[in-house]
Amino acid sequence: MAEVREQLREAFAAREQVLGFIANLERLKSDGSITEQQYEVARQEYEERLGSADVEIEQRRGEIAGEIEARRRDLEALNVERGKLDARQKVGEFSEEQYQAADRQLQVRIAGQENEVRELGLLIEAKSSAELGAPVEKPEPVAPSPHPVTPSAEAPARAVVPPWLSRNRLLALIAGVVVVGGVVAAVLLLGPPWERGGGGAQGTAPAVVEVRVPIDVEDAANVGSLHIELSYDWAVLRAVAVEGGPLAGDAMVEYDVDAPGEVVVGMISSEGLSGDGSLLVVIFELREEGDSSVLLDLSNVLAYDLGTLERIPATVVAGSFLAADGSFSAPVLRFR
């Protein structure tokens, strides 16, 4: 969502800049500071640039309109799924407890999709860059104290981070400065479910409640490097770690969770990330129980093709987490 907003804002800003140049040009002509020939040549150039900016704006609006339709179709499918769930409960297939848990999960997903539709609708109605907020000024964020992911016994061994690979070097790689060689590996796996856990002796309450939320991707194709940021409500959750999901394979993963309410992740794959599924799992500790609903929003996505190093466009769908029962909808990164 953040990237779509920024792209549209940039298109409006380009148009407004050209309009400012045209206004200045008219003033110069009126006070005789430029010749008629100079005016005509400059005016033609600015008109062409203005036309290009208008085309860009309409293209972005068309993309947003397509996303709105996709979200509405997803909403329709979720409502159908909820109706089926209700019918299955009435015929006795589910207990009341099972029905309530499944229904709450669907409500969380429906609420997330409705929020996406509302936000996309506001974008498509915007008439100027001012309506879309200030520009994002974090093209290559550098977060301190990275935590390299340590492979578990069950997971495939990951590349060891050499001592010369500083955080700056990692982000340089993500930005496409260095070619990471390899071959395409197509993977299609499902993400892990949400689960709770924690320490404590048998028969005693756990010291903490652990929340595991996947970050899913759709239609990834030969992604060699990736940088993403996840924002959340620090009053309810506290991020403590990030693990590679099934789709990550042998990718090298680094993360930073020190800033309250923010998770920064960088990935490099020597084989290329391809397919759909769970790319990462963010591990939180629950700070506040109750009925709080937390938005899990992805932003500042920087993805590059393994072979060409070209930027890969992507859109994001925010996820959500419901503290009352631990149900969630995973945030999604779409490359289609």
Image: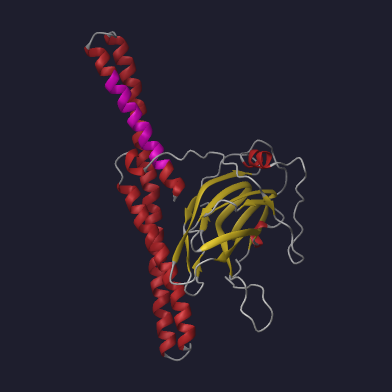
Up/down of 108 relative to 70, above or below: below
* Magenta segment: 7-24
Up/down of 50 relative to 280, above or below: above
* In the displayed structure image, the side of residue 336 where residue 51 appears, left or right: left
Q: Position of residue 153 (x, y in %)?
A: 77, 65
Q: Main secondary structure of the magenta part?
A: helix
Residue 150 sits in which quadrant?
bottom right
User: Along the line of sight, which residue is nearer the eye, 299 or 8?
Assistant: 299
Q: Is residue 280 visible?
A: no
The single residue placed furthest to the bottom in the displayed view is: 92
Q: Is residue 332 visible?
A: yes
Q: Residue at x 41, y 76 (%)?
A: 82
Up/down of 130 relative to 65, above or below: above
Q: How is the image coloured?
A: secondary structure
Q: Position of residue 221 (x, y in %)?
A: 60, 51
Q: Position of residue 72 (x, y in %)?
A: 37, 62
User: Along the line of sight, which residue is nearer the eye, 174 or 219?
Assistant: 174
Residue 100 sits in which quadrant?
bottom left
Q: Residue at x 57, y 39 (%)?
A: 140
* In the displayed structure image, the side of residue 51 where residue 7 appears, left or right: right
Q: Position of residue 38 (x, y in %)?
A: 32, 11
**Does the magenta portion include 273?**
no
Instruction: Say how many tags the image has.
Output: 0
